[in-house]
Image: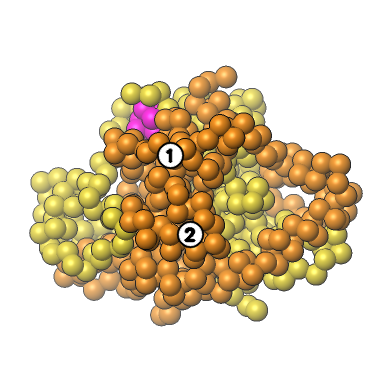
Chain colours: A yellow, B orange
Amino acid sequence: MNEIIQSLFDRKSVRVFTGEPVTAEEKELLLECAFQAPTAGCQQLYTILDVTDEDEKAELAELCDHQGFIAKAPVVLIFCADCRKWLEAYKAADLAPRSPGPGDALLAMADAVIAAQNVVVAAQALGLGSCYIGDILENEERVRQLLALPEYVFPAAMLMIGRPTQQQKARPKPERFPGKYTVRQNRFAGWEHMERKDFQDMFSCHTGPKNFGDWIRAFCQRKYHSDFSREMNRSAQRWLAAFFTK
Amino acid sequence: MNEIIQSLFDRKSVRVFTGEPVTAEEKELLLECAFQAPTAGCQQLYTILDVTDEDEKAELAELCDHQGFIAKAPVVLIFCADCRKWLEAYKAADLAPRSPGPGDALLAMADAVIAAQNVVVAAQALGLGSCYIGDILENEERVRQLLALPEYVFPAAMLMIGRPTQQQKARPKPERFPGKYTVRQNRFAGWEHMERKDFQDMFSCHTGPKNFGDWIRAFCQRKYHSDFSREMNRSAQRWLAAFFTK
């Protein structure tokens, strides 16, 4: 198989890192790969925060659902959807730009995440491990203050990067759903037409020999009905609020 | 340079394709690379629509700001953020799940875009060209009907893929902003502190010898203050509306 394709197959999340640092050259190359990603109208609607301050990392670890390993990551990058950069550029040219709306927010979010995924691919190519931290969407008030994020800027993705430990390298990559449940021809065919036995088949890659009902009830309690998930919804509403005022 | 990193640097958008088809094997491999992408809690919060119907492609080309080349793309994939899949799975297990909120929407959007970017990287590895079409966010009413998208499902990214023409291969890749304007240490340092001369420097990669003011006024008129941009904002509000009702 093509080396690049193989690398996409091999890549899995790494949450524990050896003490070895990521070099300045490696970090610079990772960031260059972010910039080289596709971007809407070549606008690069994102700003990347390179978090090197140890106290800030420790606080982020707490704010991101108390995941202490974040504080120990050699590299922490926060990809902010940034609808402020161009706004200020327009103003600097004496234009009177309209306020960013929800379409601008989604476009900037896509730009930021596309750039982040290029970093994930590049990290794998350099023998580095990476992990997304979705929890950066939580605790809007404190995260906004900590990162000094102004209006029209919000965290779209957070990555931690470092050298994987042997234990992390040995960990099997979780299975994905069979493709037939993820791809549809031409139109969305709704999950509402699926019966319990279809979901049992779809989820068997995750449940293994376990009962589908038991597995998904536990998952729902641990994830979807968790405190952090409710907090993420509360905060996301706040992150997006400015984009919804006319 | 590492082959994978080089590929990220080489990749540029391709909007015109030769008549040669993308093979079924190639498409299958691209989709497998999407599945292999990182995904929050291994949930794969997306559904990919593989648009092969010629009439549907032609209508999408019209709905995406009248870009006729979309109708001629050998492969058109729409990555939908899908907060319905797991909702239906929970219901199939007799759970009473809460309604998805804006945090769920953003998490699913990130998942969908991460998967899409893996396809972009894989396409480049196979010698195929790709281009994102952000305009899929427009015309919510007609797009929702055309793609049969239910509540809690919205298009996060659209890709067209095919074999690049010689002219497209020869086209130079647009420059990116200098890194110092895209990366900040630890905290967001606002664009509000930048003066006109800073923006002139930042934008010189795009403006070339042109006057910054003239260049950005024309850009603003063509993009940010365009009809399609206003339409994208109107529609994005509609795509997200269901996530904001309690």
Tag 1 and tag 2, C-beta contact below 8 Å: no
**Disc 1 sits on a residue from what chain?**
B
- Amino acid type at circle 1 is Gly
Residue A159 on image: x %, y % = 51, 43
Q: Residue at x 42, y 30 (%)?
A: B126
B46 sits to left or right of B2: left
Q: Residue furthest front?
A: B19
Q: Secondary structure at mark 2?
A: helix
**What stretch of residues is rendered in magenta?**
A5-11
Task: Kindly indicate the quadrant of the structure image that contains residue B216.
Answer: bottom right
Secondary structure, magenta segment, majority class: helix
Which of the chains bears the disc numbered 2?
B
Dot in front, 1 or 2 = 1
Position above or below: B37 against A215: above
Say if B167 sits above or below A115 in the image. Answer: above
The Cα atoms of the two marked residues, 1 and 2, are separated by 18 Å
Q: Residue B19: which disc? A: 1
Q: Is residue B14 above or below residue B158?
A: above
Q: Amino acid at mark 2?
A: Ala
Q: Position of residue B12 (x, y in %)?
A: 57, 38
Crowdedness near tag 2: few (<14), some (14–19) or many (≥20) residues, C-alpha within 10 Å: many
Q: Earlier in the sequence, mark 1 or mark 2?
A: 1
Residue B16 seen by the camera: yes
Q: What's the mark number on residue A122?
A: none
Residues indicated by labels 1 and 2 sit on the same polypeptide chain: yes
User: Camera-side residue: B77 or A78?
Assistant: B77
The residue under the point 34% across, 33% down is: A9
Q: What's the residue at 26%, 63% (across, down)? A: A189
**Residue named by callout 2:** B61
* Image quadrant containing the C terminus of chain B: bottom left
Q: Quadrant of residue A15?
A: top left
Spot occupied by residue B73 in the image (x, y as percentages of width and height): 44, 47
